[in-house]
Image (spheres, rainbow, N blue to C red):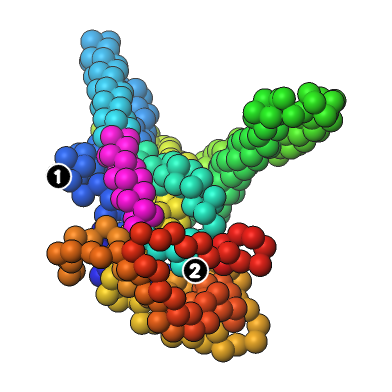
C-alpha cells in the first residue's frame, strides 16, 4: 500500500453518499505477491470458461431441434443422439472443472489478501498516535478488524469470480439470443426486467434475512456470554431470572425477524417462476405467429431441415435459441448485481485499513486535514466525532530513522506546552505547562477527578 492513492480514495469518499470507500487499486492492492496475482489470473480464466458454458449450452440445446427433426436413417439418428450426449457431457465436465478451479483460486487469493490486510492494518494501528484513538472508537477499531476482513474476503474472493462469470453469461446469452432471432429477442426484452428483478428480489431477501438473523442471534449470544462471564455477580444478586428473561426476549426477536421474511421469500420465488412462464407464453405465441406467417405466405419449411424446401425466415431452432439465450442472460443479471454489491462492501470494509496504513509522516493529505481541523476549532458548533479529520502525523513510533542520542541523562523538561485533544479543541489539557523532572524522580500528574489530566 502507498500514499499515492490517498487523493483518489478521498474523492471517492466525497462522491459516495453511503460512506467512504477505498479505491479499486487500494482494494486489490492487498495480496500483491506473484502467487496471489497468479491465482487471480488463473481464476479469471476459469471464470471466463464457466461463463461461456451457458451460452454454449443454449446453442446446443437449440440445435437439438434441427438434429432430432432431420429425416435420416436409424443409424444416423442414433449417431447424432450419441454426439449430442457426448457434447453435453463435455460441457458438464468443463463446467465442473472451471467452477471448482474458479472457487479454489479466488478463495486462495482472497485468503492471502485478507491475511495481508489484517497484518498491515494491525501494524498500522500500533504505530498510530493518541490523536487517532481519540477520534476513532478504540473498542470499535478492535472489533471491526475481523468483521471487515471477512467482508473484504467475500468481495474479492468468490463473488469477484462470480461477477466475471455471470457477466460473460449475460452478455453471451443475450448476444446469442439476438443472433438467433432479433425480433423474438427484442420482444423477450419486455419480460427481461421481470425475470431479472424477481431474481434480484429473491437474492436480496435471502441476504437481508441472513444478516438480520445473524445480528439478532448474535445479540442473544452476547447475553449468554455476559451472563456466563459474570455468573458469580449474577448469582450474588439473585438476577438469574432477569437474564433468562433477557435471553428469551432476544431469541423471540430473532425468531420473529427471521420468520417474517419467509412470506417474501415465497413471493420472490413465485415471481421468479412466473416470469419464466410469462417468457414461455410470449415466445410460444409470438414464435408461432412468425412461423405461421411465413408458412402461410411462402409454404416454407419451419424446421429448416428439408433439403428440397426453402427454410422459413424464422425457424423453430432460432425461436428456441432466442428463448434460451435471453433466459440465461436474465439469470445472470441478479448475480452480477450481487457481485458488484459484495465488491462495494469490500471497498467500504477496507477503507479504515487504507486510512490507517496510508497515514504516514509527510502523507499528501495531511495539510488538507490540518486546514479542516483549524476550521473546526474556530467554528461554534462542534463536529461529530467520526467526521473530525485526523491531524497531521508527526511521529512514527515504528520508524528507525531520526537522530539517535548517544547518552540520556533522564531529565524531562516541559516549556510552555499547550495541548488539546482533536475531539475537544476548545478544551486545553495543558495550557502553557512548564515543568522540570529531575533524573531518578517519579512525578504523577493528577486531574480534578483523581485520574490523569
Task: Give the residues in magenta.
Answer: 107-127
Residue 129 locus on image (x, y percent): 40, 63
For marks 2 and 1, the one nearer the N-term is 2
Point 29% across, 30% down: residue: 104
Task: Count how many numbered circles sit on residues in the image.
Answer: 2
Residue 374 in the image: state x and y as whole percent: 49, 86
Nearer the observer, 46 or 328: 46
Estimate how packed mark 1 is, as few (under 14), some (14 to 19) or many (20 or more) residues with alpha carbons within 10 Å: few
Q: On screen, 7 above or below 432? A: above
Residue 408 in sight here: yes
Quadrant for the C terminus in the image: bottom right
Give 73 or 390, whichever is nearer the viewer. 390
Which residue is more in the foreground, 219 or 83?
Answer: 219
Q: Is residue 123 magenta?
A: yes
Q: Is residue 332 magenta?
A: no
| 411 over 415 or under it: above or below | above
- Disc 2 is placed on an element classified as loop
Residue at the image position 48 percent from the left and 47 percent from the top: 142
Name the quadrant containing residue 65: top left
Give the quarter of the image for residue 364. bottom left
Seen at 53% across and 65% down, the residue is: 445
The residue carrying mark 1 is 34
Residue 16, label in figure? 2
Quote the CA–CA distance across marks 2 and 1: 32 Å
- Residue 330: % across, % down: 47, 45
Amino acid at each position: 500500500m502507498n500514499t499515492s492513492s490517498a487523493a483518489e480514495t478521498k474523492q471517492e469518499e466525497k462522491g459516495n453518499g453511503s460512506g467512504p470507500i477505498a479505491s479499486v487499486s487500494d482494494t486489490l492492492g492487498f495480496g500483491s505477491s506473484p502467487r496471489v496475482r497468479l491465482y487471480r489470473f488463473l481464476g479469471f480464466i476459469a471464470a471466463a470458461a464457466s461463463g461461456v458454458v451457458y451460452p454454449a449450452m443454449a446453442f446446443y440445446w437449440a440445435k437439438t431441434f434441427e438434429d432430432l427433426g432431420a429425416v435420416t436413417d436409424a443409424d444416423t439418428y442414433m449417431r447424432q443422439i450419441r454426439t449430442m450426449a457426448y457434447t453435453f457431457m463435455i460441457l458438464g465436465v468443463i463446467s465442473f472443472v472451471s467452477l471448482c478451479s474458479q472457487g479454489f483460486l479466488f478463495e486462495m487469493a482472497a485468503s492471502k489478501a485478507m491475511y495481508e490486510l489484517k497484518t498491515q492494518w494491525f501494524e498500522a494501528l500500533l504505530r498510530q498516535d493518541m490523536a487517532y484513538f481519540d477520534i476513532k472508537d478504540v473498542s470499535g477499531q478492535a472489533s471491526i478488524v475481523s468483521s471487515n476482513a471477512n467482508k473484504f474476503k467475500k468481495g474479492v474472493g468468490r463473488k469477484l469470480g462470480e461477477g466475471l462469470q455471470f457477466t460473460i453469461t449475460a452478455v453471451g446469452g443475450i448476444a446469442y439470443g439476438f443472433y438467433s432471432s432479433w425480433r423474438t429477442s427484442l420482444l423477450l426484452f419486455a419480460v427481461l426486467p421481470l425475470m431479472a428483478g424477481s431474481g434480484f428480489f429473491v437474492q436480496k431477501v435471502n441476504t437481508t434475512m441472513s444478516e438480520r438473523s445473524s445480528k439478532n442471534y448474535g445479540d442473544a449470544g452476547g447475553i449468554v456470554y455476559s451472563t456466563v462471564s459474570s455468573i458469580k455477580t449474577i448469582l450474588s444478586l439473585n438476577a438469574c431470572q432477569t437474564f433468562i428473561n433477557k435471553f428469551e426476549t432476544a431469541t423471540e426477536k430473532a425468531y420473529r425477524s427471521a420468520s417474517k421474511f419467509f412470506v417474501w421469500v415465497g413471493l420472490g420465488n413465485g415471481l421468479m417462476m412466473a416470469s419464466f412462464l410469462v417468457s414461455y407464453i410470449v415466445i410460444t405465441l409470438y414464435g408461432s405467429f412468425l412461423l405461421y406467417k411465413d408458412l402461410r405466405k411462402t409454404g416454407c419449411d419451419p424446421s429448416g431441415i428439408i433439403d428440397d424446401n426453402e427454410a422459413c425466415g424464422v425457424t423453430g431452432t432460432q425461436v428456441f435459441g432466442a428463448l434460451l439465450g435471453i433466459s440465461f442472460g436474465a439469470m445472470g443479471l441478479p448475480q452480477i448485481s450481487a457481485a458488484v454489491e459484495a465488491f462495494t462492501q469490500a471497498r467500504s470494509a477496507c477503507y479504515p485499513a487504507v486510512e490507517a496504513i496510508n497515514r504516514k509522516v509527510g502523507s499528501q493529505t495531511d495539510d488538507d486535514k490540518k486546514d479542516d481541523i483549524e476550521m473546526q476549532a474556530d467554528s461554534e458548533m462542534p463536529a461529530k466525532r467520526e467526521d473530525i479529520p485526523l491531524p497531521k502525523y508527526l511521529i512514527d513510533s515504528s520508524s528507525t530513522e531520526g537522530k539517535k542520542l548517544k547518552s540520556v541523562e533522564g531529565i524531562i523538561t516541559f516549556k510552555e506546552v499547550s495541548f488539546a485533544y482533536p475531539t475537544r479543541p476548545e478544551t486545553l489539557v495543558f495550557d502553557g505547562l512548564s515543568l522540570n523532572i529531575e533524573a531518578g524522580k517519579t512525578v504523577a500528574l493528577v486531574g480534578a477527578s483523581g485520574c490523569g489530566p
